[in-house]
């Protein structure tokens, strides 16, 4: 298996960097660091021309420690393992479990780098990287880190496998609101990398994740469903729900306020009651509408002719 495997036998899919790319990144870092150190040394020499020899020596040692040792440690800590040379070569320093490094990791790597890189011109680091299976130098061994490649081919991207066809839609009524994001991430990582795990270890890991998922949902899986298939089915249901929420059309806003009450004083009903919904029988018949009342035209008053309509009668 090509990649990084943790102590829990979880395949991370990280590709360790080999000696050529690490050597090129280290060469670029050394060029930048040494150029900065020379410029600072010249500036210190010009600024301390009037001081005694002891003061000049103390400033030289301080500049050596701060520039050649402290600067790489600070850069790796602030950039989470990406120095200038590693950034150019597409590399990064990570922990053995794949997480970002912290100050203590960068400190140990930098302190050991003084011995195996600066004092021996990189010979010890090259030999250790060639001997190590994952290309680690002595500083990586003591710090618990390794250098991995960040730039991978798009074809090697891992996707969550679909569930078996007979499980599609079986978990539509499952309550997934109590499942935390960390558990979803762990389940997806297992599903994308379960093909590279030992069968016995992968089975135990799938059963543990399935037990945690059942504890969060409160609903046991159907009888006879394997743990891995159960996880794949629940993840597919969760992704389907996310897709429906993301692409569902917006609901039409409700109509305006209530109609004004008539002048008689009694308020008109706000809306007509809907007929009840029938579950399993014939739909109820629609209520018959009452016949419309005839319209009475006002009679003309005594002494008046027909009410004027604006049209002349025919001759």
Image: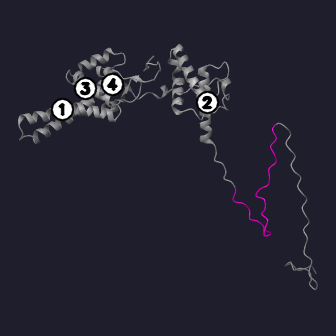
Image coordinates of residue 145 in percent, x first then y, are 35, 24
Rendered image quadrant of residue 138: top left
Residue 83 in sight: no
User: Distance between the Cα atoms at labels 2 and 4?
Assistant: 47 Å
* Farthest bottom residue in view: 303
The verdict on residue 257 being magenta is yes
Which residue bears the numbered disc 2? 217
Q: In terms of sequence position, does the residue under pointer 3 or pointer 1 come before the other?
A: 1
The crowding category of the residue bearing disc 2, from other C-alpha atoms within 10 Å (few below 14, some 14 to 19, many at least 20), is some
Instruction: Give the label, 2 or 3, closer to the camera.
Output: 2
The residue positioned 59% from the left and 25% from the top of the image is 231
Image coordinates of residue 284 in percent, x first then y, are 86, 44
Q: Quadrant of the C terminus?
A: bottom right
Which residue bears the numbered disc 3? 111
Which residue bears the numbered disc 4? 21
Which residue bears the numbered disc 1? 64
Q: Is residue 205 left or right of residue 137?
A: right
User: Distance between the Cα atoms at labels 1 and 4?
Assistant: 26 Å
The magenta stretch is: 255-279
Q: In terms of sequence position, does the residue under pointer 2 or pointer 4 come before the other?
A: 4
């Amino acid at each position: 298996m090509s990649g990084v495997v943790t102590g829990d036998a979880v395949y991370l899919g990280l590709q360790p960097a080999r000696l050529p790319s690490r050597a090129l990144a280290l060469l670029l870092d050394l060029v930048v660091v040494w150029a900065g150190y020379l410029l600072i040394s010249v500036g210190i020499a010009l600024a301390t021309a009037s001081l005694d020899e002891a003061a000049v020596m103390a400033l030289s040692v301080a500049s050596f420690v701060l520039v050649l040792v402290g600067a790489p440690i600070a850069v790796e800590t602030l950039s989470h393992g990406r120095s200038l040379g590693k950034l150019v070569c597409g590399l990064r320093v990570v922990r053995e479990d794949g997480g970002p490094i912290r100050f203590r990791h960068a400190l140990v790597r930098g302190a050991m780098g003084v011995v195996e890189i600066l004092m021996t011109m990189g010979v010890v680091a090259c030999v250790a990287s060639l001997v190590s299976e994952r290309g680690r130098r002595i500083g990586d061994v003591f710090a618990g880190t390794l250098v991995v490649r960040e730039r991978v081919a798009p074809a090697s991207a891992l996707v969550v496998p679909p569930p078996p066809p007979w499980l599609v839609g079986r978990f539509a009524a499952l309550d997934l609101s109590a499942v935390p994001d960390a558990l979803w991430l762990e389940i997806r990582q297992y599903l994308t990398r379960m093909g590279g795990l030992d069968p016995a270890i992968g089975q135990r890991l799938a059963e543990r994740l399935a037990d945690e998922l059942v504890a969060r949902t409160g609903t046991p899986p159907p009888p006879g469903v394997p743990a891995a298939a159960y996880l794949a089915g629940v993840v597919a249901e969760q992704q389907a729900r996310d897709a429906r929420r993301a692409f569902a059309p917006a609901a039409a806003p409700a109509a305006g306020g209530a109609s004004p009450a008539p002048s008689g004083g009694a308020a008109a009903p706000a809306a007509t009651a809907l007929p009840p919904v029938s579950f399993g029988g014939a739909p109820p018949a629609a209520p018959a509408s009452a016949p419309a009342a005839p319209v009475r035209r006002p009679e003309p008053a005594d002494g008046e002719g027909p009410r004027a309509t604006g049209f002349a009668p025919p001759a």
